[in-house]
Amino acid sequence: MYQEPSIIGASWLSEQSFCEQKLYLNKVKKIPLVATFSMKKGSAVHESKYEEFAKEAKPATWEEFFASDGLVVSREVELRHSGNNVILLGRVDEVACDKDGVYIIDDKPNDYAYIGIRKQIWAYCHLVENNFKALIEKNNKTVFAVLKNRDTGAVVWKEKYIGTHKEELLISLMRLRDVLTGKRQPEPTKNANKCKVCQYNSVCEFSLVKEKAEQT
């Protein structure tokens, strides 16, 4: 029986790692999230970085981009790829290329690459590889996943995108697809600190903060 593909945003991989139940309440139950100060700041910083990039950017084809030996950069690259009954969408903060490789870069206000963040960047790598596979192979470029501190510009984590990462990403995508379609139950976090900062802690049946309050 035909089933519509599930639309999944690359950033959902990071949200899934934080708390799958929170993601479920937002994406399936459609309980809206209020834009926080940090969310608004993040959007403003990304917009500012793009405006600075646009002032200096020179038009080029993707063929010229991936063939370049000197450092070239593109920002806010929107991509999609379909496979395994999933439509994966993503907007990559920065794609850079030089003679040594292709760098898929995400900017976050973090000094540590948590597993959810790494999966999100692997999802961007997946998108770039599948959209530009022929050009990457033609120019014999290696794909690297990179996390930069959004505020300092420092590289927090950099790693070659390899087969084990692809396997781990696929497992997460298939699980998330099944959660979104009701084939699996979402798994709530077991970390009370996450519940404390969650906007859904007053309505979530699994909230550890609510449980603690009821016990007292």
Image: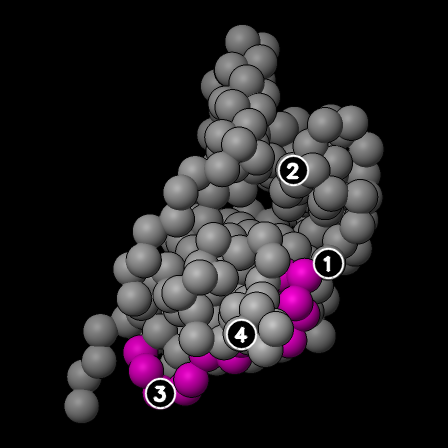
Earlier along the polypeptide chain: callout 1 or callout 4?
A: 1
For badge 3, the amino acid type reads: Lys
Packing grade of label 4 (10 A; few <14, some 14-19, many >=20) is few
Considering depth in this image, is 199 or 73 the residue closer to the camera? Answer: 199
Considering depth in this image, is 24 or 155 the residue closer to the camera? Answer: 24
**Left or right placement of residue 155 versus residue 178 in this view:** right
Earlier along the polypeptide chain: callout 3 or callout 2?
A: 2
Please, is residue 212 above or below residue 76 in the view? below
Instruction: Verify whether residue 78 appears in magenta.
Output: no
Q: Which residue is disc 4 drawn over?
A: 214
Name the residue rendered at 39%, 81% in the picture. Answer: 178
For badge 2, the amino acid type reads: Asp
Earlier along the polypeptide chain: callout 3 or callout 1?
A: 1
- Horizontal and vertical percent position of residue 165: 68, 69
Instruction: Verify whether residue 189 appears in magenta.
Output: yes
Q: Secondary structure at mark 4?
A: helix
Q: Which residue is disc 1 drawn over?
A: 114
- Give the mark toward the camera: 1 or 4: 4
Asked whether the viewer can see residue 60, the reply is yes
- Horizontal and vertical percent position of residue 89: 40, 53
Q: Which residue is disc 2 drawn over?
A: 107
- Give the mark toward the camera: 3 or 2: 3
* Span shown in magenta: 181-194
- Horizontal and vertical percent position of residue 213: 57, 69
For badge 1, the amino acid type reads: Tyr
Name the residue rendered at 70%, 51% in the picture. Answer: 145
Q: Which residue is disc 3 drawn over?
A: 183
- Horizontal and vertical percent position of residue 39: 52, 36
Gap between marks 1 and 4 measured at Cα: 32 Å
